Image: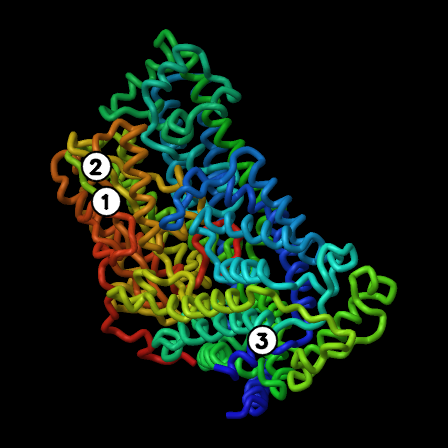
Amino acid sequence: MKFNQYIILFLSLFLSFSCGKNEDVDSFGKKEMFTNYADNLILPAYNAYGTSLSVLQTALNDFKTTSNLTTLTALQSAFLATYEKWQFCEIYEKTDPANNVMAIENINFYPTRVDSINAYIARNENTTTVIKSKNKNDKGLPAIEYLLFNRTGNNQQILDRFTTDVNATSYKAYLTSLIANLIEINTTILNEWNTSYRTSFINNVGTDASGSFSVLVNSIAQRADDLKRHQVGIPAGYSGNVATANTYPSASQAYYANKSIEYMLLTLNNMKDVLNGKATTDGKGLIDYIRTLNVTSTFGGNLADDILNQIDVCITKVNACGADYAETITTDKAKADDLFLETKKLLILIKVDVPSALGVSITYTDSDGD
Amino acid sequence: MQKINEFLFRSVSIAPLASFRILFGAMLLFSTVRFWLKGWIDALYIQPKFFFAYEGFECIKPLSGNGMYLVFVFMIIAAIGILLGLFYRVAIILFFLLFTYVELLDKTNYLNHYYFVSIISLMLCFLPANKYAALDVKFGITKKATLIPFWCIGIIQLQIGFVYFFAGIAKINTDWLLHAQPLKIWLKSRDFFPIIGFLFSYKITPYIFSWFGMLFDVSIFFFLINKKTRPFAYTAVVVFHLLTGYLFQIGVFPYVMIVATWIFFSAEFHQKFLYFIFLDRFRNKFGMTATKHVGEEPSRCHPELVSGSNESIYQPKSASFFVLIFILHSIIQIVLPFRYLLYPNKLFWTEQGYRFSWRVMLMEKNAYTTFVVKDKTGKIAEVRNKDYLTPQQEKQMSTQPDMILQFAHFIAEEYNKNKGFMDAEVYVDSYAALNGHPSQPFIDNSVDLAKQPINFAPKKWILPFKMETHSSETSEHR
């Protein structure tokens, strides 16, 4: 074919497309999807967590005024409500507002360092300023959990910490500062969402490093990674993907309150809802978008379906572990191994297949490609 | 032989080379300053704790302190020298050395157009690009020449031809032509772009782009050297590169090629161009005659025909030697893209013989790669990649086996030296997805990579790429 003809052919193809259809930009409704995420999922999750923090603060005040078993129990349940609400927020840890305050390190890093917390309390290092500067292992929800719970469930022992112990005052001060710190962090996150980030999140529908697709996929992938690594793997003695001879049951999330299994289920169910874009009503979500791409997963089925199925498989395996993950690791580790294997498969789907199908950049750096 | 000699050594106007020098210098200046302003000197050459050296260039290390900034200061000065044709020889040699040094520091940052800039800069070290429209002529640093042997221009044109042609050849594969991958993924994700975005929702669009891209790359050189088709070809070059530049995050690459292909235009055209960019009062300063100089047609430009006129001819003594070197270079350029045939397994999967072959925008590849270190005493630890690598390094490393191996060696050394491991073993668990194919195991996790040699031999621990049995195009939505 002559060159001129080939240019003409190309241009005419181009033009025929242009004349054909013009209204159908963003046929899927990406903005609608990210609006759904911001307004129906993300902001409500942080708001609910924020509200439960206020309730926790009130319960703490009551407990400090009258320290008895009744106020302690109220404080404990206010705390558990808060920790539970956080499970819905953690999946957004790589969105800018959470990433900027290092949400995971500051809010939910476990296992908490019991020895150093006790040492700080004994040394009266318990102000909010001190807490802010402390290592990730010494603060956040896991530190509060350690202060308010023990594995025996003997609440009198807990109450004694805050009443009759030589460091009782310091215990109370440390707890107060921990909660104040969490409130401050969440206020910062919410402020950023409400002032500027919401708009840019909704409008930045690209797949480049700063685009909302990248941010959301990275965030969910990070959550799947943390599920595999911290919630399931490390307590069961996994180093990376390699099983070791050791186990660390006390490294489980919410070990003292024995909520590991419950929170794994919350994590997985919430992940499913987030992927579906499902809040009180079922809106547009990533899975719906992935379904339009019609790609095959590593399991041979439709990627969208296989991800949701794999989450269900993981839920089944979590349930098989019984009510106490730490105990399962000690008595029936094969069940934890099973679970680990399935969470790893889930991670690969989300971390490798999804970015590949979407063409999203999995890193944050801005750089040239070729 | 006689004919080839006549073809290579015939005198032609220097104008294309001089105007190429100016534009190329301006482009180098722009991209070096841009690189600095983006903060990449710090991000790419100061922040990283570990650098992925090219095999055989392990001794090349970044400078400490503000050293890397100094390198870029000199590069900027050199680019200005090239642009103005001032102390040109020193400037171009300096630029080539510094630029190539920077590129050799870390495989992470390999880009085909950086390789191209290195090659062209090296060629320009030997070419008389400062003998016209240059301050060197004005200051008597070099003698003015208006005619040069054709090979001085031809070699650059040929190199550009290699770039396009092999980029086109590389696109002749099933992923690109039959499945329109990775364009199918990339275009779909850009369907919100203004004006043309709606095109990307059509199933046929990535196929049209893929086939057009392949045909464009394979044929554009021939249309550029042909005088009749040249204006159309250059328009196509501009449109093609601007479009890809608009769609994809490929930095200065489109501008590099738009500038480079400028050299294909005729002497007359370049003469006009030079007169256009130099205002009357500057012409003398740059060693150009005040009267309009019209380039010669090849048939009228044999040295004997123009001798005695006011033309000054540049004929280097060692011309045959240069030409020999350039022929050798061309042979290497032709052979290098095919070295992958020496390796088993799918090229895009193993990436053995992938670089330095003008393979541009061919892959959407993602991987999740984790490292575990063990030793005989029972110590075991998972490596946090980000403790040692920048996000960009980690991304590049996780999909490229030679970089995985280098990082494994580094990890072994690090754990032996600083973490009390004895003779550390490094195992890699990796899953990768390529061009819309589902993810699959990438690296054999039973092999201790710390014990695998870093060399060019086939890497047996890369697991074979398996084509899926299920088709991703079973049902149609559009």
Q: Nearer the viewer, residue A269 or A65?
A: A269
Residue type, mark 3 in image: Phe
The Cα–Cα distance between marks 1 and 3, rounded to whole angstroms, is: 58 Å
Residue tagged by mark 1?
Answer: B427
Q: State the SS at label 1.
A: strand
Q: State the SS at label 3.
A: helix
x then y, percent, for residue A318: 22, 47
**Is residue B175 toward the left or the right of residue A344 in the image?**
right
Of labels 2 and 1, earlier in sequence is 2
- Residues behind callouts 1 and 3 on a single chain: yes
Where is residue A76, by image quadrant? top left
- Tell me which residue sits at (49%, 24%) in the image: A133
Pointers 2 and 1 in contact (C-beta within 8 Å): yes
Residue type, mark 2 in image: Lys
Pointers 3 and 2 in contact (C-beta within 8 Å): no
Q: Mark 2 lies on which chain?
A: B
Of labels 1 and 3, earlier in sequence is 3
Residue tagged by mark 3?
Answer: B9
Where is residue B431, by image quadrant? bottom left
Residue type, mark 1 in image: Tyr
State which quarter of the image contains the C terminus of chain B: bottom left
Q: State the SS at label 2.
A: strand
Picture layout, residue A182 above or below residue A34: above
Other-residue count near label 2 (Cα within 10 Å), few / some / many at <14 / 14–19 / ≥20: many
**Is residue B395 toward the left or the right of residue B29 in the image?**
left
